[in-house]
Every structure is written in C-alpha cells, then in structure tokens.
Amino acid sequence: MANELPTPDALRYLDADHVEHPSGTFAGVTVRSQDDQQLGSISGVLVEPTTRRIRYFVVKRSGLLSRRYLLAADTPAVLEANDQQLRILSNVDDLERFEAQQVAPFSEEDAVTAMFAHPAA
C-alpha cells in the first residue's frame, strides 16, 4: 500500500542544517502549535531515501530535560520563512518521543540510493 509508513530501519536521520527550503535551511526554525505555543525547534528530519521523502521532523524541546520528538511531515503546516517558524495545525500532544538509536544517520550510500531511486511521487 502506498500510504504505509516505513519501518524505522528504512528511515535515516539528517541534520536540519543539511535540509534546505527556499529561504535557507531548517536549522533554527521554531515549531509553533495552532494556539501559538512554542513546541521547540527543528533539529533534523527523518527521510526515506528510496522515496526521497521527509517522513518526520525531529523537534528538540528545551527545558529541564532537553528531549527530541517526532512530528509527522504530513501534519498540515505553514513555513513562515522570514520569521524562521513552522506553524503546525496540531499541538504538543501530537509529538512522539524520538529514540535516536533506532534510526541510522543519512550516509553516502543513502545519497546514492536517493539519486537512483524512482522519482518521488
């Protein structure tokens, strides 16, 4: 089925400073909820190299215990590039805890896979 989510072993972590959008990179982009609550900042993304798709944003939440969480990339959102903010139509309850040891970093082999995979849908 085309809409199935990939397994963790099919995903790769890529730092936010390596992910570009029309106004720069995702490094330092703040994530805000629909009720304007600051949820954290984007520290990276989880990509699926074979489909060349970002599946999750990795959101770093500050506080007493700095932790990272996942936000599904298909969550409705608006990138306010000039303000370096990603406004999501969601809230803090929609974030899932990110276990970094379950996902390998994006590698040169993954780049080759992405270059020669079928075009993204």
Image (cartoon, rainbow, N blue to C red):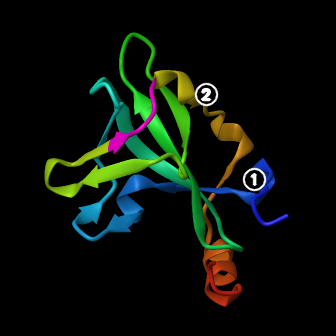
Query: Where is residue 31 drawn, in percent x and y?
Result: 34, 37
Q: Which is closer to the viewer, label 1 or label 2?
A: 1
Query: Label 1 sits on what residue type?
Result: Leu
Q: Which residues are magenta?
A: 87-91
Say which residue appears at 62% left-offset and 68% top-offset.
107
Looking at the rendered structure, the secondary structure element under dot 1 is loop
What's the CA distance linking mark 1 and mark 2?
Answer: 17 Å
Residue 88 covered by magenta stretch: yes
Q: Magenta segment, principal secondary structure?
A: loop
- Nearer-the-camera pick, 86 or 49: 86
Question: Badge 1: few (under 14), some or many (20 or more) residues near its Cα, within 10 Å?
Answer: few
Say which residue appears at 68% left-offset and 73% top-offset.
51
In which quarter of the view is residue 61 placed?
A: top left
Is 96 situated above or below 79?
above
The residue that disc 1 covers is 5
Closer to the chain start, of discs 1 and 2, is: 1
